[in-house]
Amino acid sequence: MNAFLNGLLRCRRAPWEAVASILIALGVFMLMQPFALVAFTYSFAVTLVGTMTFIIVSHFPE
């Protein structure tokens, strides 16, 4: 856990790609769930933020 947080603070690629992937998966889940309209409403924004984060952090050093 400490290495993960240290990687986030030092702008390393692997931890930030994990965060971006979780955001993308969360956005897709929010899009496909039939229970909460609020989650469906924000699903595109969450997916977009995750995708943009992934694109940006793919340029970070390993």
Image: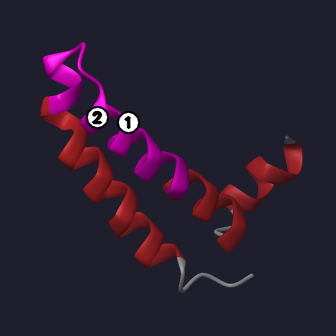
Query: Eyeballing the image, is 38 above or below 56?
Result: above
Q: Identify the residue at horizontal 67%, vertical 57% (top origin).
A: 8
Prevailing SS of the magenta stretch: helix
Mark 1 secondary-structure assignment: helix
Q: Are marks 2 and 1 in contact (CB under 8 Å)?
A: yes
Q: Which contiguous range is marked in magenta?
A: 21-40
Asked whether 53 or 43 is in front, the reply is: 43
Q: Identify the residue at horizontal 30%, vertical 26% (top origin).
A: 33
Q: Amino acid at mark 2?
A: Met
Quadrant in the picture for the N terminus:
top right
Q: Badge 2 is on which residue?
A: 32
Asked whether 19 or 2 is in front, the reply is: 19
Quarter occupied by residue 42: top left
Q: Is 5 covered by the magenta stretch?
A: no
Quarter occupied by residue 36: top left
- What is the x, y in percent for residue 51? 36, 65
Q: Amino acid at mark 1?
A: Phe
Mark 2 secondary-structure assignment: helix
| Residue count near mark 2 (Cα–Cα under 10 Å), binned few <14, some 14–19, many ≥20 | few
Q: Badge 1 is on which residue?
A: 29
